[in-house]
Image (cartoon, rainbow, N blue to C red):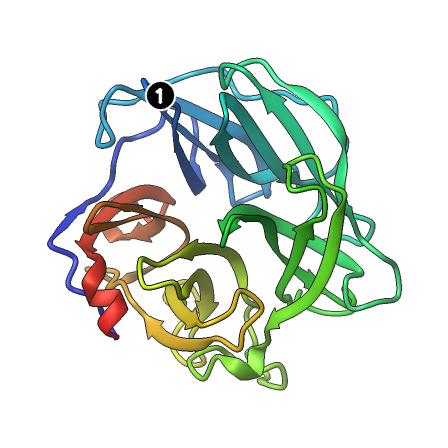
Amino acid sequence: MTLNFTQNVFPLFHPTNLDDVKDPCPVFDGHLWHMFGSGGTVTTETWILFHATSASIEGPWVEHPPVTLPISGSGIAAPGVIFDDGIFHMFVQTEFMKSGGRVEHAVSNDGFNWVVLPPAIMAISETSEHGVYDPHPAVIGGIKYLVYSAMPSFTRVPQPDVYLARSTSGTWFGPWERVGKILDHADVPHHNHRDDPDYEWGIEGAQLVELPDGRVLMNATCFLPTGKRGTRQRVFFAVAGNVSGPYRSLGPVLDPMRPGENGHSTVMIAGQELLLFYQSRIETTNHRWRFGIARCPVTDVIAA
């Protein structure tokens, strides 16, 4: 399905001195909008933790120096951030192409200065969570969760599925109890199959949002089974009656507008409106990744 996005602003801004901006995660602290994400270049897969602010959700955005954290890894990117009870909580990957990754947890009072706490989740070698990345916090039914991508090995192109962990303390400080896999390749008919000789990538960038009717909306990224590479990545939605599933895919929801693709995104529900912040690259951006924001009635999703 393609939702009726009544307003679609793309790109939100053109970054300074960055080839690409990916993995948008907007957060409102009650006074100011913060945009976190990955900044850098897909050419060398070199990334920083991007940070910008604005008084308005649609800008203009002021870019700030990247968030620097005293953590190690070759894939520190894709932060999932939430503002709760006056504190920013950032969950961030350290790897996405190697084993031994961690989901690190950092906190901040202002969104600029961060303190790193013990990791929330560690990869477990020789298991289905041999690699972990793309964490995103969620509150469903008053319970705090982390949804993330995980995979059993890196013997070929990463093939992650979607996994879930629950805070047993009722706080963002954990400890985190693994719930397990909640969405598999086989559950997404519009996603490339593992045995496809032109397999591109797995399911990633998942986020969970509680809908007004009590169901759970999963917002995630798939890769279409056909088409040229560079045109197959898509934002898709899936719904479930329970946070652990089973999830029913609603299919890709956002048209790239021009030849290109879209992906890793964050959903916010504001009253009767659903806001989708997404990454996309098309001809008019010279196929560099940029951020966009699209809006549709939340009733459209509930009725799907």
Q: Amino acid at mark 1?
A: Thr
- Residue 74, given in percent of the width and then of the height, sits at 72, 39
Say which residue appears at 55% left-offset and 47% top-offset. Answer: 136
Does 109 sit left or right of 14 as displayed?
A: right
Q: Residues within 10 Å of mark 1 (few under 14, many from 20)?
A: many
- Residue 182, given in percent of the width and then of the height, sits at 60, 70
Identify residue for label 1.
Answer: 53
301 relative to 93, above or below: below
Q: Nearer the viewer, residue 44 or 249?
A: 249
Say which residue appears at 65% left-offset and 27% top-offset. Answer: 106
Q: Nearer the viewer, residue 154 or 134?
A: 134
Question: Which residue is the extreme one toward the left?
Answer: 6
Does 73 sit left or right of 158 as displayed?
A: right
Quarter of the image with the C terminus is bottom left
User: Which picture quadrant has residue 47?
Assistant: top right
Say which residue appears at 71% left-offset and 24% top-offset. Answer: 116
Say which residue appears at 75% left-offset and 54% top-offset. Answer: 177
- Residue 48, given in percent of the width and then of the height, sits at 56, 30
153 relative to 132, above or below: below
Quarter of the image with the N terminus is bottom left
User: Which picture quadrant has residue 238?
Assistant: bottom left
15 relative to 272, above or below: above
Does 293 sit left or right of 6 as displayed?
A: right
